[in-house]
Image (tube, rainbow, N blue to C red):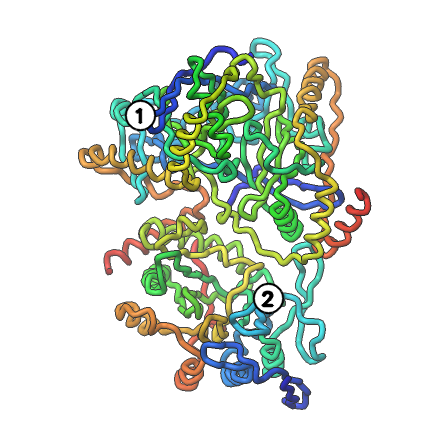
């Protein structure tokens, strides 16, 4: 609901079809140095510009083109793109299931989440729950925009996550850099395993993130003392409702704070 | 099995398992629950009337499994009022409308300890009567923090000339509602409004308030669940029992009382249990009565 | 062939140091499009605009800031940024080891092969130990002025280093606000059966990128001036929740 949908369609396995939307699973982290406008400290964002007119171009005026020569392009519309593989542009058909442990992590490319559209909530949860119980992932191919993806769909914490996979031809062979086999001393192995066991813990990604943020904040403390941190103007987010409402709320807020 | 057939206004209603203890901590039985709801019926019925009921049934008591029921049980007496609601897939579903005392008793006989209803009436399911600010304390925060937020929220909305009313959820949070009672109001409007309010409060009180649902964002903060303003969502009805360890009630507070409780700093004195609910209602009447009639507009929407 | 190593480092934990060379493990190639202005097919360029005023902002009016918890930004100049950014070192520090099954794929970004820099018994010992204990090493290192978090794993015959995202870059499942539906054991049972029938071994080489070929064909057709027939994408009718059980049963009949 609050998430922006990247793609919408249906996922299917055998005769069951579930209406879904694809949403992001990756977002900018809290450790990022954002570009700001020196004038008012508004965050900057990237937009497409027409070099001749020196004006911003809205998405509806943009078309993709394939370069066949210097400044010579073949344009391709969204509909033409969907026509290329029409059976896979709006449908993710799970053709088989595999054991999760059989998927080598080198194949994982980019993660997304699927969220059920109206009416699909039950079938969605059923698929997620069954994959959780059986420890399996569904494999499928689907087309989104310009590319066809091989994907694995698995249960993560009750949600269906769609992870794009690399094709096997994209995995580079490692034969020429393999270490040779050589007899290993059992004593060394035992010693190393002991150290490893002592250093074994639970995977805690939040901890690594917090450590990194803390260390940067410490480094920034000095700077923050020299020059006080700045506040960007109120309107940072297009999603915050009508400009007037937010302005009115902020005005009311200022009065509230004064009186407290 | 303890069965009893009562006659209310000429209708036969068969009551069963009256001796069954549903709140083990206090020995509260089904008979007690029926009695509670009978006593508060003049106050709760106006808030239930004409709304699609979601039953939350605890057939074996609050310590055992429960289930939600949105569909009106098929084995209902003929006199139970119903409505047809369109479900998400386009199909129709029959829902119960608790329009009178008999239906309330019948529903309670099914051990629906908690009564949940949408913000809109069944005959206009996309037209909410009110906007709700569901204050939910995250891990490490409590009802006192919710009260702090409620007071700031009240002042904020007052600046926009909106009156709102608080009630306990009966569990760990608070609900603050502003009546609208406008024919043209939509959930898109109320959602947009409540989201903006939540975000402004979050920006100005980042250590106390969050507008984000993620559990990590809620630690030690009060989450303003603006997404409750939706046709598919329900809230526990005012004066409904809650299936906690003790028979607490979702009960309205006056702002003066809330200020007093908040400054007192004792979270244990906040929950209202069923016997207190009955006596307070007798003394002061329905503090939530204005929710049914007051007309207000959302500004800038 | 993997090609030349892109970086050299030392795996380090306790008193153990193992010199390694990093090689990229994946190479992607696909048709690239440019973005053009519809009316004159001029190639568009990217510019930074001010979110507030919606006007382009030249580089001299840009400054970097780090967002604090209270929403304010600490400003940093390029030279201050240089100081804050981690210094390169050749050490890949292993902080701890975790069970392989705990690392979920949402965190994995890229994969690198690790070639032992010298014929290294320590390398082989570590590889064997990781295999026996079924663990991966969580490590940090700095490469080209960026700090990385990664997982060191043994796969088949070679050690690999997978870079990981930080937790704050992964959208939490709770924010999806998924509804909780009630599912019957019968439905779960039949679905489970169905999935067993549809289970195969993981053989990724079976899957080819057919779309690339077809896309090139489309472009060639257009270059020749041929007309493109627009086909509507196939849309499946969603299974309604009331028909879920019978659809599962019918599916099972089909595959069993």
Quadrant hosting residue B1? bottom right
Quadrant hosting residue A256? bottom left
Left or right: B36, with B98 as reference point: left
Q: Which mark is residue C162?
A: none
Q: Is residue A144 visible?
A: yes
Q: Which mark is residue C86?
A: 1
Image position, residue C246 (x, y; %): 77, 53
Looking at this view, name the residue that lies furthest to the left. Answer: A226
For the residues labelled 2 and 1, the Cα–Cα distance comes to 54 Å
Instruction: Establish if C56 lies above or below C99.
Output: above
Instruction: Establish if A32 lies above or below A202.
Output: above
Image position, residue C84 (x, y; %): 27, 27
Q: Tell me what residue is drawn at x 33 percent, y 69 percent.
A: B267
Look at mark 2 in the image and give the residue it sits on: B67
The answer to whether mark 2 and mark 1 are in CB contact below 8 A is no
Q: Tell me what residue is drawn at x 37 percent, y 40 percent.
A: A207
Chain label for disc 2? B
Under circle 1, the secondary element is loop
Q: Tell me what residue is drawn at x 44 percent, y 40 percent.
A: A203
Image position, residue B144 (x, y; %): 33, 64
Q: Nearer the viewer, residue A241 or B137?
A: B137
Image position, residue C256 (x, y; %): 80, 44
- Dot 2: within a 10 Å radius of its alpha carbon, few (fewer than 14), some, or many (20 or more) residues? few
Instruction: Establish if A200 lies above or below B38.
Output: above
Quadrant hosting residue C242? bottom right
Q: Tell me what residue is drawn at x 72 percent, y 13 percent.
A: C224
Under circle 2, the secondary element is strand
Chain label for disc 1? C
Q: Nearer the viewer, residue C168 or C22?
A: C22
């Amino acid at each position: 609901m609050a998430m922006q949908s990247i793609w919408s369609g249906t996922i299917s396995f055998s005769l069951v079809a579930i209406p879904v939307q694809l949403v992001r699973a990756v977002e900018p982290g809290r450790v990022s140095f954002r570009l700001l406008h020196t004038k008012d400290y508004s965050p900057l964002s990237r937009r497409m510009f027409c070099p001749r007119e020196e004006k911003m171009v809205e998405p509806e005026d943009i078309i993709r083109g394939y370069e066949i020569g210097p400044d010579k392009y073949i344009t391709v519309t969204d509909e033409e793109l969907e026509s290329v593989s029409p059976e896979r542009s709006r449908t993710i058909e799970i053709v088989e299931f595999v054991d999760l442990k059989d998927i080598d992590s080198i194949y994982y490319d980019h993660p997304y989440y699927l969220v059920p559209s109206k009416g699909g909530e039950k079938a969605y949860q059923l698929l997620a729950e069954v994959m959780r119980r059986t420890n399996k992932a569904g494999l499928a191919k689907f087309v989104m925009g310009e590319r066809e993806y091989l994907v694995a769909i698995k249960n993560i914490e009750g949600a269906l996550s769609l992870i794009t996979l690399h094709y096997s031809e994209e995995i580079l062979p490692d034969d020429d850099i393999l270490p040779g086999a050589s007899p290993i001393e059992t004593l060394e192995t035992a010693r190393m395993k002991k150290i490893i066991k002592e250093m074994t813990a639970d995977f805690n990604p939040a901890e690594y993130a917090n450590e990194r943020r803390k260390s940067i904040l410490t480094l920034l403390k000095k700077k923050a003392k020299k020059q006080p941190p700045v506040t960007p103007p109120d309107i940072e987010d297009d999603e915050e409702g009508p400009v007037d409402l937010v302005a009115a709320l902020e005005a009311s807020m200022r009065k509230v704070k004064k009186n407290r | 099995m303890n069965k009893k057939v009562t006659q209310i206004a000429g209708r036969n209603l068969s009551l069963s398992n009256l001796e069954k203890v549903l709140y083990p901590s206090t020995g509260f039985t089904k008979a007690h629950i029926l009695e509670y709801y009978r006593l508060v019926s003049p106050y709760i019925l106006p808030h239930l009337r004409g709304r699609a009921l979601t039953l939350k049934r605890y057939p074996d008591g609050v310590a055992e499994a429960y289930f939600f029921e949105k569909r009106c049980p098929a084995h209902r007496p003929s006199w139970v009022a119903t409505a047809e609601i369109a479900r998400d897939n386009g199909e129709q579903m029959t829902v119960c409308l608790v329009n009178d005392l008999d239906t309330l008793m019948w529903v309670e006989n099914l051990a629906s300890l908690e009564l949940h209803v949408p913000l809109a009436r069944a005959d206009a399911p996309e037209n909410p009567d009110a906007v709700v600010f569901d204050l939910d304390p995250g891990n490490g925060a409590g009802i006192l923090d919710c009260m702090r937020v409620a007071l700031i929220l009240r002042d904020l909305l007052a600046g926009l000339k909106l009156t709102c009313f608080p009630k306990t959820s009966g569990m760990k949070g608070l609900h603050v509602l502003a009546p609208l009672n406008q024919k043209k109001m939509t959930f898109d409007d109320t959602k947009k409004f409540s989201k903006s309010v939540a975000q402004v409060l979050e920006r100005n009180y980042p250590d106390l308030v969050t507008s984000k649902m993620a559990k990590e964002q809620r630690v030690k903060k009060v989450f303003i669940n603006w997404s409750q303003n939706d046709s598919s969502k329900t809230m526990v009805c005012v004066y409904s029992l809650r299936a906690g360890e003790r028979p607490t009630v979702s009960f309205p507070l006056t702002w003066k009382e809330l200020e007093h409780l908040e400054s007192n700093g004792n979270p244990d004195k906040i929950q209202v249990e069923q016997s207190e609910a009955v006596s307070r209602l007798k003394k002061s009447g329905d503090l939530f009565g204005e929710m049914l009639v007051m007309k207000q507009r959302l500004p800038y929407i | 062939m993997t090609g030349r190593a892109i970086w050299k480092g030392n795996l380090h934990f306790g008193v153990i140091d193992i010199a390694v060379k990093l090689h990229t493990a994946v190479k992607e190639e696909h048709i690239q499009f440019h973005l053009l202005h519809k009316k004159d097919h001029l190639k568009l360029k990217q510019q930074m605009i001010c979110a507030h005023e919606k006007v382009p902002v030249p580089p001299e009016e840009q400054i970097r800031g780090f967002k604090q918890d209270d929403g304010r930004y600490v400003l940093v100049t390029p030279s201050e940024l240089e100081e804050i950014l981690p210094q390169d070192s050749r050490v890949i520090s292993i902080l701890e080891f975790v069970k392989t099954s705990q690392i979920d794929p949402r965190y994995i970004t890229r994969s690198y092969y690790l070639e032992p820099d010298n014929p290294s018994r320590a390398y082989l010992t570590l590889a064997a130990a990781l295999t026996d204990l079924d663990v991966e090493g969580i490590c940090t290192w700095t490469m080209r002025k960026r700090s990385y978090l990664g997982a060191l794993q043994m796969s088949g015959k070679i050690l690999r280093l997978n870079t990981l995202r930080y937790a704050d870059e992964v959208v939490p499942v709770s924010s999806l606000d998924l509804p909780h539906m009630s599912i019957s054991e019968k439905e779960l049972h039949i679905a489970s059966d169905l999935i067993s029938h549809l289970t195969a071994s993981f053989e990724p080489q079976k899957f080819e990128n057919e779309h690339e070929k077809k896309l090139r064909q489309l472009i060639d057709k257009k270059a020749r001036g041929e007309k493109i027939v627009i086909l509507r994408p196939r849309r499946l009718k969603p299974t309604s929740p009331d028909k879920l059980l019978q659809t599962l049963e019918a599916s099972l009949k089909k595959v069993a």
